[in-house]
Image (cartoon, coloured by chain):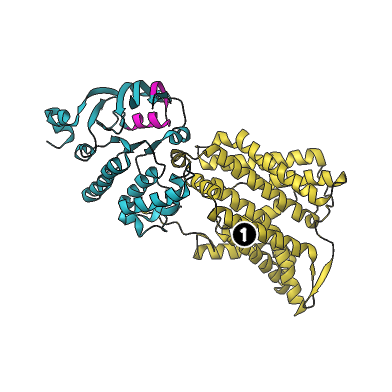
Amino acid sequence: MSLLELEDVTASYGHAQVLHGVSLSLPENGATGLLGANGAGKTTTLRAISGTVRTTGRILFEGRDISGLGPDRTAHLGIAHVPEGRGTLGQLSVRENLLVGAYQRRDRKQIATDIDYVLDLFPNLQARVKSNAAALSGGEQQMLAVARAFMAKPRVMLLDEASLGLAPSTARRVYDAVVRLRREAQVSMVVVEQNANLAFSVVDDATVLETGRVALSGSRDELMGMDAVRRAYLGG
Amino acid sequence: MSFFIQVVVDGLSNGAIYAAIALAIVLVYRATALINFAQGGMAVAATFLAYALTQAGVPVLLALIAAVVFGFVLGALLERGVMRHFEGGDPDTAVVATIALLVILGGASAYFFGYEPHSFPSLFPNKTIGFFGAFVSLRSIGTIAVLIVVMVALQLLFRSTKLGLAMRAVADNPESSALSGLPVSRLLMIGWGLAAALGAIAGVLVAPQLFISPGMLDFVLVYALASAILGGLDSPVGAVVAAAFIGVVENLAGAYLDFIGDDLKIAVPFVAVIVILVVRPQGLFGRKTVVRV
């Protein structure tokens, strides 16, 4: 059984329909990428899953239809959405951001252990634990956003353009940590990324979206072998 | 010397009144990131309920508890029924909606109880004690004591509890907080309920001194806003210290500066607020906002 399955999902903002029937499937412990140009519907697909946009069609998570549930409910079920543009709470400290991430958990000891774990994952945050999130650099904020999402102990993480606006070496460090989260904590991933090299360092397969529809999908190696994909997303 | 002490003590007792409402403003700001003008209206409505109960022979303390419960329910209902429609929109629109609520609540109170001021029984004995040659009323001491307890409780709520952390997170960014599974609507409702409950405490504390009427908090609201802003808007301690400061400075200036006297003294705290905010825009105790992009 797939962990997450989208069947013919459409989504619209007011009258503007952005997704026109997207289907995709994420296996247990899998990681899949969403590629495509600006406006192809990558972010909206993630928003459809986390329940922050109106949808039709079926979205199955662990076999249960979750379409129509709001973000607080999908978060409760184990879906952690790291939105584009750094999902941090600016006026709260790094540590408080992590505690907010763990809001739904009751296992206090394990929460403390997990805070230590993410601070080990992102050593940059260690020194800034008491700083307000708004005072962090862009890279640190992105790290905090990922760390906060992980604190919910999700089954699946929806990662939206985590490299946006970051220096290449910083983006690399963020993705190295994401790879570790997948391997060490068995977090499944849906990764939206303009930089396909970064995306392919995490995912097993990917779906290419074009104007709200699935243009093609395949395993990482298949897609990397295609000239069109290489030209469009891998810089030649 | 005893005259000076008397002026300071009277200033502090006025400051306690401002502080009571200022704390409620800080609470709702921390919980919803809005300046809530309806605060005064909710406090007055809850205080009128307490008034009606005391008129019916209920002891003041019980009436206070009933008013606090009523205030919580009223605040939560107003959030749910009215303010929720403005969530996610322009915050300025929401602030205007709170002004509308202030007017409506004041009108409703007047509809049931009229505009005449009524006397309101005090929670504390109506006695004064001597203090270095000055007279201090037990009512003022009691008011200040209750406020200090409330201030410490609020500080603890926001700094050390999960509920307080969640309320701050929602005030900071509701969409982002929902992604961590925070029940945003419910937290905003609790925030409004707590603020109105606190307003009820404030109203019952100050009503014996001000006499209860629909407009009893109108001028207090102005001082309370000044105190909250001067204290830093997000700091309970700051609001109380600033309110005490405003009360004392106002009274001292009225008593000692001839050209100011009783008529002009209302201007003094505002001049002080402007001067301080020019030097320290985040207020005396506010956290400075540093944003890197």
Q: Position of residue B185 (x, y in %)?
A: 55, 37
Q: Is residue A27 visible?
A: yes
Query: Where in the figure is residue A8, as x and y percent of width and height?
Result: 34, 19
Of helix, strand and loop, which one carries label 1?
Answer: helix
Q: What residue do we see at 42% from left, 29% from top?
A: A53
Q: Residue at x 84, y 65 (%)?
A: B127
Judge whether residue A55 is colored magenta. Answer: yes
Nearest to the observer: residue B8 or residue A24: A24
The cyan chain is: A
Q: Is residue B138 left or right of residue A188?
A: right
Residue highlighted by disc 1: B152
Judging depth in this view, the residue of A199 and B38 nearest the camera is A199
Near mark 1 (Cα within 10 A), the count class, few <14, some 14-19 or many ≥20, is few
Magenta span includes B60? no
The foreground one among B221 and A176 is: A176
Chain letter behind tag 1: B
What is the residue that sits farthest to the bottom in this orientation?
B1
Q: Quadrant of residue A65?
A: top left
Q: Colour of chain B?
A: yellow
Q: What is the magenta range?
A: A43-59
On screen, B83 above or below B43?
above
Q: Position of residue B106 (x, y in %)?
A: 73, 42
Q: Residue drawn at (68%, 70%), measured in percent from left and top?
A: B253
Q: Does A58 appear above or below A37?
A: above
Residue A228 versus residue B213: which sits nearer the camera?
A228
Tell me: B92 left or right of B197: left
Q: Is residue B214 visible?
A: no
Which amino acid, by three-letter code, is at mark 1?
A: Val
